[in-house]
Amino acid sequence: MFETLTDKFQRAFKNLRGQGKLSDEHLDAALAEIRDALLEGDVNLQVTDELLAAIRAKALGSEVMLQLKPDQQVVKIVRDELATLLGEHSKPRYASRPPSVWLIVGLQGSGKTTTTGKIGRWLQQNGHRPLVVSTDVYRPAAREQLAQVAKSAGVACFPAANLSKPLEIAKAALREAKLSASDVVMVDTAGRLHIDDELMSELSELKKELQPAEILFVADAMIGQDAVKSAGEFHRRLGVTGVVLTKLDGDARGGAALSIRKVTGAPVKFVGLGEKYDALEPFYPDRIISRIMGMGDMLSLIERAEQTFDKKKAEDLAKKLRREEFSLEDFKDQLQQLKKMGSLEQIVGMLPKIGPLQNLPKDTQVDEKRLKRVEAIINSMTSAERADHNVIDGKRRKRIARGSGTTVQDVNDVLRQYMEMRRMIKQYGSFSRMQGRGLGKLGKLNRPS
C-alpha cells in the first residue's frame, strides 16, 4: 500500500536537494508534485488543499529551521502536517464493567463479517475472551457465515438459532457472555447496499439499548472516497467511535486512510492487510506516515518478527553464525520463518526507501511459488548435502532437480543465492545487520524472469 504516494513524495523531495534555500519557485514545484501524489492516491480534494495550505504557510513562515536544507525542511513540515491530519494512535475502548459491547457496522459487502472474526482473533491474542454474534436476520445464511468465520478464527460464536429480532439476539448474546465470562461481545450488524432510514433506526436502537463501548465502521479501502463518504454519513447519524479499513494491502494508493479521520472525525483503529484471520493490525498513524515518507516501518517489522520467530532457533542460529556454520538447512529455516511474517513483498515494503536500502530494485516482487520451489529443492537434498553444500556435484544436482521437479539451473540458482548469503553473513558479522540486503537478494531471486 501507499506505493504511489511514496514514489511521488520521494520525487518531490529529490528535486529540492542541492538547492541553497527554499524559494517560492522551488516550493511551488514541490507542492505541485505532492498535490498530484495526494490526488492520484485518492485523498479527498478538500483534505488535500487544506494540507497543502498548511505546508505552504509553515514552509514560508518563521517556523522553518534555518539549520535544515530545503528538502529537509519540506520533509519535516510534510511529516508534521500528516501527523496532525491523522492524529495519534487511538486505542480500543472497553466498558468499565465487562462485558464490553462492540457494534460492527457498515455497508453490505464491506467485509463486516470477516472483520468481526479478525478482530475477535486479535482480542483473543491480546488476553481477552470475545464472543461474536450476528444480528443480520435479513441476508440469507448471514448467521451461518459468521459461525464459520468464528470457527476458522478460533473465536466463540453465539448462534441465536431461535431468535428473529436483532435486539433480542444481541441481548441474549450479552447474557451468554456474562455466564461464560466473555469480556467483549462483538455484534455483527446487518448492512445494506446503501444507507437508509430502516438500517439506521435499527442501529440506533441497538446503540441505545446496548450502550456499546465501540461502534466500529468497516470500510473497504479499495472503493476510496466512497468509503470515506459512507463513514461520514454513519458517523453523523450514529456516532462512530472508530473505523476499520479492509483490503488496505490491495490498495497502492491508500487515500482513504489519509482522508477518513479528517472527513468523519473518527479515528482509524484497525486495518486489514490480507485474507487470513491474523491479517489485521492496529492502526498506528506515525508508522503509516514513516512508510509514506519512504522511511519504512521498522517497528511493525520488529513486532512481526517477535511474534513469529522462534527465540530458541534464533539463539541457535546466532551460535552457528559465530562459528560460520550457516547451512542450507538453516537457509531453508530462515525462509520459513520469514514466510510466517507475511508476504516478503509486504516485508520489503516496510523497509526504508532512503539511506542504505534506497537502491533496492523498484520492481522487487516476491513470487511465493518460487519460494516454495526453493524449499522443494532443499528438501530434495540429503541431510549430508544440506549440512555441507560442497558435496553437491553435477550428478547430485541432476538428482536434486529431478526430485524437486525443477531444473539444474534452478538448483544452481539456489546454491548461488545461499553462497551469497553466507558471504554477507561473514562480511557483516551478524544476520541482523545484513537482513535488509538479504531481503533485497531474496526479492531479486524471486523476481519473475
Image (cartoon, grey):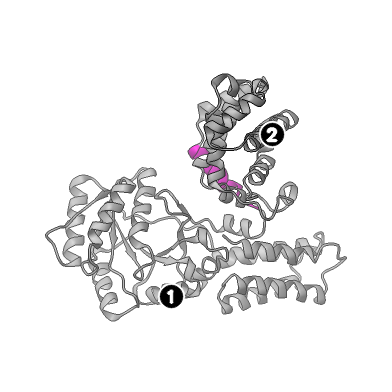
Q: Residues within 10 Å of mark 1 (few under 14, many from 20)?
A: many
Q: Residue furthest left?
A: 162
Q: Residue at 63% across / 56% down in the picture?
A: 290
Magenta stretch: helix, strand or loop mostly: helix
Q: What residue is drawn where x is 69% and y is 34%?
A: 416
- Element type at marker 2? helix
**At which x and y percent is residue 2?**
59, 62
Looking at the picture, does residue 331 appear above or below residue 141?
above
Instruction: Name the amino acid type tagged 2.
Output: Arg
Q: Which residue is mark 2?
A: 416
Q: Residue extending furthest right?
A: 20
What residue did someone put label 1 on?
232
Question: In the displayed structure, does residue 188 sit left or right of residue 353?
Answer: left
Highlighted range, magenta: 296-308
Relative to 256, is 140 on the left or the right?
A: left
Magenta segment: does it hold 70? no
Q: Identify which residue, 389 or 246, lies in the foreground.
A: 389
Residue 121 visible to an observer of this rendering: yes
How crowded pointer 2 is (Cα within 10 Å; few <14, some 14-19, many 20+) is rated as: few
Q: Nearer the viewer, mark 2 or mark 1?
A: 2
Q: Amino acid at mark 1?
A: Gly
Point out the tag, 2 or 1, that comes first from the N-terminus. 1
